[in-house]
Image (cartoon, grey):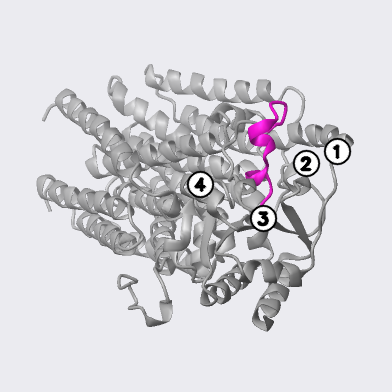
Amino acid sequence: MGTNLSNLFYLLTIATFILALRFLSSPAHARRGNQIGAAGMLVAIGVTFARSGLTSYWEIVLGMVVGGGFGAFAARKVKMTAMPQMVALFNGVGGGAAALISLAELHRLLPAPGRLHVDIALSIVLSALIGSVSFAGSMIAFAKLQELIGGRPITYPGQQFVNAAVIGLCLAAGIALVAGVQREWLLWGLAAGASLFGILFVLPIGGADMPVVISLLNAFTGLAAAATGFELENNVLIVSGMLVGASGTLLTMKMGRAMNRSIANVLFGAFGQVTAEAAAVAAGEGGGTVRSANAEDVAVMLAYAHKVVFVPGYGLAVAQAQHDVHQLADLLEAKGVEISYAIHPVAGRMPGHMNVLLAEANVPYTQLEEMDDANSEFPRTDVAVVVGANDVVNPDARNKPGSPIYGMPILNVDDAQVVVVLKRSMNPGFAGIENPLFYNPKTVMLFGDAKASLSQLIQDVKAL
Amino acid sequence: MSHGILLVFEVTILVLTVFLGFEVISKVPTLLHTPLMSGTNAIHGIVIVGAMLVLGLGHKGPFTWVIGFIAVVLASANVVGGFVVTDRMLEMFKKREPAKETKDGTKP
C-alpha cells in the first residue's frame, strides 16, 4: 500500500479515536465509543501491515501475541480496586515503547551524511526523554500502588538537587544530539538518566497523591508518542499522542484544583511528610465530645428519612463494602427514601475511581452525584452517611486557614440534618489530619468495620 | 513534499489537536474520568504503529531487531490491555435494575 492511501486510512483511525473520546461524554454510549476506538486501532495495525516494503511479519505477529496476550490476561484478571496500578502499568509500557522506537530510529539514521534535520533529532531526543521518564515513573507508581514498595513518601536531604542534576545531564546530552553530535551512546545515556529521573521523581510522592501522578504520566506517554510521530513523519501518531497529552494535562489540572494544590506542590512537596507533622500538632489540640450510636438507632434514622446521601471514600473500597452499601440503599429505596451518592473528585486512587467501584456494585450511575450537585443537595438531606471517607468531608478545609487541607473543596455533609460516620476508630485518616466533623453535635459515629456495620444496618432496617 | 513544508504541516496538525483535545476532554464528566484515563491510555498504544515500522522497515541487523521486537511487545500490551480494561469498566456503568437491562446498557 502506498503512503497516500495508508495515510487516508490513518485519518480514519484518528476519526475513530476522536469519536471514542466524544462518546465518553455520557455513560450511556461510552462503551460503544471505546469499541469504535478499538476498531480504529485495528485499522491502523492492518494498514501498517499492508505498507509496501514491510518485512519481518512473523516477528511482528509473535511480538503482538506475546504482548497482547499479557495485556488481555492482566486486563481481565485485575480487580477494580487495583485499576490505578493497572493503568500505570499499561501507561509505562507505552512510554517504554516510545523510548525504544527513538533509540532504534537514531540507530537507523546514524551515521548520517552531514547533520540530521534538527526537528528529527529534537523529536528523537524528546521521545526518548519523556518516554523513559514515563516508563520508569509508571513502574514506580505501579510498585507503590501494588504495595511492592512502601507507599509513604521517600525523602532524603539534597533530593531536589540530585533530581535537578540528573535531569540537567539528560538535557545536556539532548542538546548535544540536537546540535549535531552523532553519538548513539549519548541517547542511551539520556534514556538511562531519564529513567533514573523517573524513579527519583515518583519515589517521594505519597500514595494519596498518586491520582495526580498517574494522570501526569499519562500525559507524558501521549507526548512521547506524538514525538515519535514527528520522527516517523506519521500523522496518526502525532494526533493520537497529542490527544492523550491534552487529556492527561487537563485531568492533572483538574485533580490539582480538587485538592487545592498546585501541581508543583504535589510533585515536589512530599505531602505525606508535611501532614504527619501537622497531625502531631493537631493531636495535641484535642477535640470535643464524640456521640456514638448503635446500628439500631441509625437504622431507624435512615428508614424514616426522606433523603439519604451516601458519601463513600476509599475506606469503603478497602473494606470491599460497595455491595453492602448498595444493598442497604436498595432496602431504603423500597421504603420510599430518596437515595444518592456524593462523590468527591479525588475519592479513590485515581480520578473517578469511586464511580467505577460503585458501578461495579451495580449502583445506577444516575444516583452518582458530582461534588457541586451534591453540595447543593445537602441542606435538604435528612441523613448523610459517610463511609470510609475522611479528608474530603473535613470542615477544616473551609474554616481553618492553618490546616494542610485548607482551601480544598469538600463535600459539605454538615449541611445535612444528621451526619452518620461509619469509622473503625477515632484514628485520623490517610493524610493524618484531625477531623472536627466527628465532634459536631449533628454527627453520630457508628464505630466498627465498615462492612460489618453495614450488614448490621441491613439487618436492622429489614427488621423494622 | 519537501521536509520543511511537511514539518510545518505536522506542527499545524499538532497545535490544532491540542485545542481539539481540550475541547473534547472537557466534556467528559467526572463520573467517567477513570475510563477516560484508561481509554486515552489505550489510544497512546498507537505507538504500536511506530514499533511495527521500526521492526519491519528499519531493519539494520540484530540490534534494531531486538529493540523493535521489545517495542512491539510493550505496545501490544498497552493497546490490548488498555481497550479491554476500559471495556470492562464501561460495561459496569448502568442506569438502573441491571437484571432487566439489555447488555449494552442503553435501555433505561
Point out which mark residue A371 bears: 4
Label 2, residues with CA under 10 Å away: few <14, some 14-19, many ≥20: many
Same chain check for tags 3 and 4: yes
Kind of residue sitting beneath label 3? Val
Q: Position of residue A124 (x, y in %)?
A: 37, 32
Provide the residue span drawn in magenta: A388-404
Q: Nearer the viewer, residue A329 or A124?
A: A329
The chain carrying label 1 is A
Give the residue number, with chain letter if any, for mark 3: A418
Residue A432 appears in the picture as rendered: yes
- The amino acid type, in three-letter code, at marker 4 is Met
Query: Is label 3 in a helix, a strand or a loop?
Result: strand
Q: CA distance from mark 3 to mark 2?
A: 20 Å
* Circle 3 Cα neighbour tier, 10 Å, few/some/many (<14 / 14–19 / ≥20): many
The residue lying toward the viewer, choosing from A258 and A417, is A417
Residue under pointer 2 = A434
Whether residue A396 sits left or right of residue A62 in the image: it is right
How many C-alpha atoms fall within 10 Å of the one at disc 4: few (<14), some, or many (≥20)?
Answer: many
Q: Chain of mark 2?
A: A
Q: Are marks 2 and 1 in contact (CB under 8 Å)?
A: yes
Distance from label 4 to label 1 (Cα)? 29 Å
Query: Which badge, 2 or 1, comes first in the chain's sequence?
Result: 1
Q: Which residue is mark 1?
A: A283
Lateral position of residue A126 relative to residue A167, left or right: left
Q: Residue at position x 38%, y 61% from top?
A: B83
**Disc 3, disc 2: CB below 8 Å?**
no
Which mark lies nearer to you, 3 or 2?
3
Q: Identify the image quadrant of the C terminus of chain A.
A: bottom right
Alpha carbon separation for disc pair 1 and 3: 25 Å
Dividing the picture into quadrants, the one containing residue B85 is bottom left
